[in-house]
Amino acid sequence: MAREVEKKAVFDTDSAKEVVKELRASFVAGKTKSYEWRVAQLKALLKMTEENEPQIAAALRDDLSKPELESYIYEIAMLKNSCRLALKEMKRWIMPEKAKTSLTTFPSSAEIVSEPLGVVLVISAWNYPFLLSLDPVVGAIAAGNAVVLKPSEIAPATASLLAKLVANYLDSSCIKVVEGAVSETSALLEKKWDKIFYTGNGRVARIVMAAAAKHLTPVVLELGGKSPVIVDSGINLQVATRRIIAGKWGCNNGQACISPDYIITTKDYAPKLLDSFKRELEQFYGKNPLESKDLSRIVNSNHFARLSKLLDEDKVSGKIVHGGERDKNNLKIAPTILLDVPLDSLIMNEEIFGPLLPIIMVDKVEDSFDVINSSGTKPLAAYLFTNKEKLKEKFVATVSAGGLVVNDTTVHLAEHTLPFGGVGDSGMGAYHGKFSFDAFSHKKAVLYRGFACDAFVRYPPYTRRKLRLLQALLGGSLLSIIRALLGWS
Amino acid sequence: MIIVSAGLFKDCGRCFKSSSIVGVGLGDTLAYRHTYKINQVSFSSSIPSSYYCCATLSKTMEEAKQTFDVDKAAVLVKELRKTFSSGKTKSYEWRMSQLESISKMIDEKEKEIIEALHKDLSKPELEAFISEISMTKSSCKLALKELKHWMMPKKVETSMATYPSSAKIVSEPLGVVLVISTWNFPFLLSLDPVIGAIAAGNAVVLKPSEIAPATSSLLARLLVEYADESAIRVVEGAVAETSALLEQKWDKIFFTGGARVGRIVMTAAAKHLTPVTLELGGKCPVLVDSNVDLQVTARRIVAGKWACNNGQACIGVDYIITTKDFAPQLIDALRSVLEECFGKDPMESKDRSRIVNSFHFMRLVNLLDEDKVSDKIVVGGQRDRSHLQIAPTILLDVPDDSRIMQEEIFGPLLPITTVEKLEDAFDMINRKPKALAAYLFSDDEQIERKFVQNVSAGGIAINDTILQLTVPTLPFGGVGESGMGSYHGKFSFDAFSHNKAVLYRSFAGESPTRYPPYTPGKQKQMKALISGDVFNIMLALLGWFKD
């Protein structure tokens, strides 16, 4: 706490200015642009992760009581994969991309050159505080930028671990961590950055983007939303149920931006689905899930109170069909399923971000699409479980979301060939794999010409003849071209 | 007829009141625009249909000025959103039909477009034809040709982690988008983004610039006639109308213009989390080496400066950097090419656009009249306030802290800065905000390589100017102060699309390690799998790790 106070007193606009100045000097010196520097930093980042696995898992346990296996798969292993992929592919990513040229500029050649944007800011979130902090940093480094990372103060153990590790392992003249909360973030946001990469919620995202607008800074906003799961009948129910549980409670106890938020299924199928949930949940988390070590806790008492309020709303509290137990002291809420909650309830109008799962019922499974699209906001992910090809097609054609998965949840995140990012209220811009590199690069168009082939039609004085010739050339009529060249028109 | 023109006269005054908020409507402009209005009336009075268009113009102007407020804007967006939700704009057929219709519109209305551009900017016919009409047409044709291809979902590889699975990236329209355009290429810069928006399947509102009023009203009239009104609209107007539009929630805003308004647009967009493309400008430098083909170089610089809307182009040449020794030769070459192109008295030439209005005329005159600048003129310098013309003007060795070297010139003035060694120029360029374009003339491949590596700008052309704009395989857009996002060709389609990640799995391929309870055995197995240790994987699979 004493350290917190000290920090708050110390990191202000002036300190932010100093940080940016130092990094800009490194960037201008060209240090971060070299291939060797990028490789060295990524290798150091990989080494840092490998050498500190127990410490990372411990910090995540402190911040979120995150089960070790979850920490390992979703934070440590994912980050290592990101580093390895960047190390393997970077040479190809930084190669200029040849572009075809046309007759207009003949003879010529053209290419698209990826260049670093400059000094970038990454503002991260608390739910996957390790991965969501460093994954964008991997992209920023691979693209050759200097970078400041502001981890979330709501996961303080991970934040201070990151500050310590990054200082120890990475080039501190180009990569820095600034810890802090609102005042530090505001101080940082006042500065001119060449890109801001923010992960978090829509409210703060609006603040970030408005601050960015002052300096014409482009942004990537990775937000969340109410990600729906549509469950059709005639499926392998056990597998579907397990995959929904893995994406909901097995993903930081529902505190993940792509976690299933609510389920839509048919009236007929809902009882079967509910039974299956009850069975599988017991198998996974035992008879008393509040005791299970395999569920993250609710991050803090604010969020615990927020979730309790969602559950305690009058028209909702009677709809609990499974779970509902809470333990305020340990910040635990049991996996809770609610059936048939009204669409105008709080729980159906804000992102749940916790272990509560409402099930909405429709007459026909096709009606689900309207339920999703009539909410007016686009979620970060949408899921469908079905065996019907027609339904899959319709789902992909009519449901708008950052990403879609058919017959599973959350696993699209693991595919680096797919862009990960939202649309509308779930954000803008995307990353992962090459998309991370692109998010932190400017695509510079370069056209090369020689001094030959100088077309006289291009230059004034603009005679009638030049105009006719041009019109003929562009119209593509051979006869007209000849006529124009011969001066017949 | 006189009565009608008097009515227009009145509207005109109102129109000026609102533009003076932006600081554009000086007295002179007012007088000038009256002339234009009256001209237009007499021009169109002979044919009943044009008379009708003229009446519509005055009516829409009046209506727009008086009543296009936030409520109107909200109604407009609601209508378009309804159309979009119905799925109409998503179909391939709809997109094709709209693009075909726009292409037809350009073919059929070429004359009127050229006339409007002449009214707004005295733009020479050939320039209007090359840089606006044919560019828009080829953009349309390319979209028509490639649309099927662009719309196809892109298959991507999947990994072991989700095996068995397949994945693709699906391009979907963003929804209802706003295009705010500008006055220097008022036809091209209005329709080119609209073509992208339509190709990507969006409903779109276009707000053309009020500073090019003839083109603005022509666009309003033509799009009603040629495009599907339920999904494609034009809103004419100035600050008030733009503000009303910006208050609405859009799914994308595409803005072309200056950085100051760019900031306002992005701030407004932030309220609704709307992504933006900002096409701005900047001081585009030309670096000239001493080993070049001097005549071709001079011609291409003249083409990228004065023959490009008389310097009023966002990628037009802003200033030249060359070596001290070479500067005199370059100036001589430029002088003779200028005479070749525009004659002995360039003020008489019809082959250059005029300065758009008296506000910009005064702005440019102020740049020239600054104390430390006015004696640096080596070519040109003549001005004619009544015709809004300034001769092609070259200045040598103006101080770097002068206003002409600090702000975007956007007109027919061309300062030349000299350096000892060409490499010194890189620093000079990089100290300034990033420009939309940077140019180099050189026969030395090493310098070329260095230039491409070290100079940051939206785009670069080597040994030519502005032509990078015409290559549809190159993204066109700025970086830093020159903007964000890009368009042209497929990039236009992408600018108005969301790339939706889609992953397909079947119910097979279940791995128990994924599910709780997370036993020690599962943990070991997982770690082994992920770290790729074959021995441990075998142990794990054989169940030798005990829970």
Image (cartoon, rainbow, N blue to C red):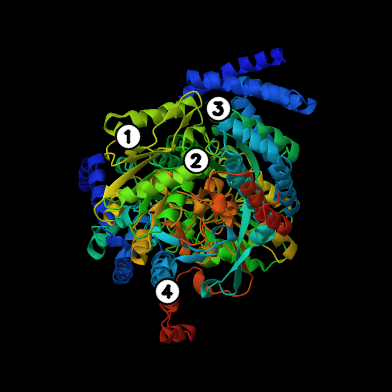
Marks 2, 1: nearer the viewer: 2
For mark 4, does the 10 Å Cα neighbourhood hold few (<14), some (14 to 19), or many (20 or more) residues?
many
| Residue identified by numbered label 4 | B523
Circle 2 sits on which residue?
Answer: B342
Q: Chain of mark 1?
A: B
Give the residue pinned by disc 3.
B238
Residues indicated by labels 4 and 1 sit on the same polypeptide chain:
yes
Could you tell me how far apart the alpha carbons at marks 2 and 4 are, in whole angstroms?
79 Å
- Compared to A112, does B43 lie above or below? above
Q: Earlier in the sequence, mark 4 or mark 1?
A: 1
- In contact (CB < 8 Å): disc 2 and disc 3: no
Q: Are marks 2 and 4 on the same chain?
A: yes
The residue lying at 70 percent from left, 13 percent from top is: B2
How far separated are the C-alphas under marks 3 and 1? 28 Å
Say what amino acid the circle numbered 2 marks: Phe
Q: Which of the two labelled residues, at mark 3 and mark 4, occupies the earlier sequence position?
A: 3
Residue B23 occupies which quadrant of the picture? top left
Tag 1: amino acid: Arg
Question: In screen coordinates, is B476 left or right of B105?
Answer: left
Mark 3 and mark 1 lie on one chain; the one further toward the N terminus is 3
Tell me which numbered mark, 2 or 1, is placed earlier along the sequence. Answer: 2
Residue A472 placement (x, y as % from top left): 68, 53
Q: Chain of mark 3?
A: B
Residue on which disc 1 sits: B403
